[in-house]
Image (tube, rainbow, N blue to C red):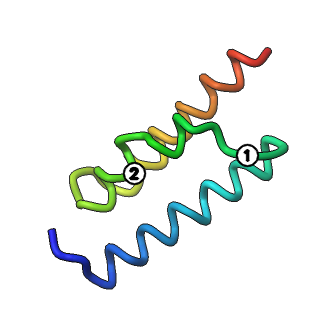
């Protein structure tokens, strides 16, 4: 896939989302969250934005449960 304005926009959105998640969790985002396959799937149009958000949400919830 060639780099398009949409690809750049999606990458910036991912970085913003990761910063928000990190702030909400009190610091740095876990390395595994940064490396989730879901990011590339959404950037490349393989999954919808809703599917992407659900995958991120599920990951964060599972991480929270592990910390409890």
Report the residue at 79% width, 15% height from top.
68
- For the point 63% across and 37% down, which residue is it? 30
The residue located at (32%, 84%) in the rendering is 5
Identify the residue under disc 2. Answer: 39
Q: Is residue 20 above or below residue 31?
A: below
Q: Quadrant of residue 33?
A: top right
Precedes in sequence: disc 2 or disc 1: 1
Are the two marked residues, 2 and 1, in contact with CB atoms closer than 8 angstroms? Answer: no
Give the residue at the far left of this rendering.
1
Rendering coords of residue 60 (x, y %)? 61, 34
In-front residue for pair 8/48: 8
How far across and down, in percent of the image, does residue 15 sit? 56, 63
- Tell me the mark number nearer the camera, choosing from 2 and 1: 1
| Corner quadrant of residue 36 | top left
In percent of the image, x 33 and y 78: which residue is there?
A: 6
Number of callouts in the render? Answer: 2
Determine the secondary structure under disc 1: loop
The image's mark for residue 15 is none
Q: Position of residue 53 (x, y in %)?
A: 48, 48
x, y percent for residue 35: 45, 42
| Label 2 Cα neighbours within 10 Å, binned few <14 / some 14-19 / many ≥20 | some
Mark sitting on residue 28? 1
Q: Quarter of the image containing the N terminus? A: bottom left
Structural crowding at the residue carrying mark 1, measured as other residues with C-alpha within 10 Å and reported as few (<14), some (14–19) or many (≥20): few
Dot 2 falls on a residue whose secondary structure is: helix
How far, Cα to Cα, is label 2 from label 1? 18 Å
């Amino acid at each position: 896939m060639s780099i398009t304005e949409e690809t750049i926009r999606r990458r910036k959105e991912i970085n913003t989302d990761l910063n928000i998640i990190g702030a909400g969790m009190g610091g740095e985002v876990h390395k595994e969250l940064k490396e989730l396959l879901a990011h590339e799937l959404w950037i490349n149009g393989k999954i919808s934005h809703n599917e992407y958000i659900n995958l991120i949400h599920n990951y964060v919830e599972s991480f929270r449960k592990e910390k409890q």
